[in-house]
Image (tube, rainbow, N blue to C red):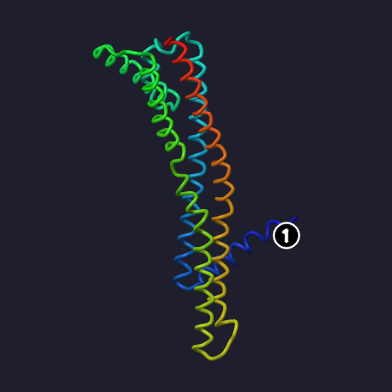
Amino acid sequence: MLASFVVPPVLAVNIIEIFERCGTVDKIIVIGLLIFSLVAWTIMFGKHYELKRLRLLNLNFESQLRDHRTVLDSPESFRNKRVIPYADMFADAIESYWRAASIGKERGEDSSRARLEHAENALQRALARQTLRYETSMIFLASIVSGAPFIGLLGTVWGVMEAFAAVASQQSASITQLAPGVSGAMLATIAGLVVAIPSVFGYNLLLGHTRRMIMELENFASSLADRIELESK
């Protein structure tokens, strides 16, 4: 039991000592990877709670909308909740529908088909806008997932190069000469993997959640278009 409490401090001290023995370039790479790790964790937690909050808002709005007999004559308050993805799509569709009806009456060319087409086009634009909103920050997280191992590899190659350069300058190979370069190379590799491994799991989980919510957006848009079509007849 005592060994389990003793090992972590020893490892922590060793890592600090290894970092101190690293070259300047490897230190910069390790610090940069540490910053990327903090950014990745911030994005993952922030995106998780954002998607969770938006989904709850969507479900609540859909439940309220389902309780109304008609969507075309829904209260004005339903179109003032633009922060909710479903409400934003709903507002665009209804406003486009009545705008087309008003213009059609002025021209004497009012038809339910034209109104429906305008509403459907507005739904598609709103759907694309909300899809981009869901995918915000995902590209940056994917870049960290893809780039962290390569940055770590850069530190590895650089550390090995420093080790060979030290040997070449002294014309002899000893642990003292090899240690800084090799230590920096291994630490950079570890840092790259520490950043990439949690990030790739978090990215895949968030990507699956995002795709499911985008599918829900598409289903809501289709359902809303059907209700508008039925009520416009």
- Residue 160, by quadrant, is bottom right
Residue at far front of view: 109
Q: Residue at x 40, y 12 (%)?
A: 72
Q: Residue at x 58, y 69 (%)?
A: 186
Residue at far right of view: 1
- For the N terminus, give its image quadrant: bottom right
| Residue 8 in the image: above or below residue 203 | below
Q: Residue at x 57, y 59 (%)?
A: 193
Instruction: Determine whether the residue tagged by mark 1 lies in a helix, strand or loop.
Output: helix
> In the image, 4: left or right of 85?
right
- For the C terminus, give its image quadrant: top left
The kind of residue tagged 1 is Ala
Q: Please state which of residues 93 and 67 is positioned toward the viewer in this rendering.
A: 93
> In the image, 100: left or right of 231?
left
> In the image, 123: left or right of 210?
left
Q: Position of residue 207 (x, y in %)?
A: 54, 42
Q: Please state which of residues 170 and 219 is positioned toward the viewer in this rendering.
A: 219
| Residue 107 in the image: above or below residue 196 | above
Residue with the mark numbered 1: 3
Counting labels gives 1
Q: Position of residue 192 (x, y in %)?
A: 54, 61
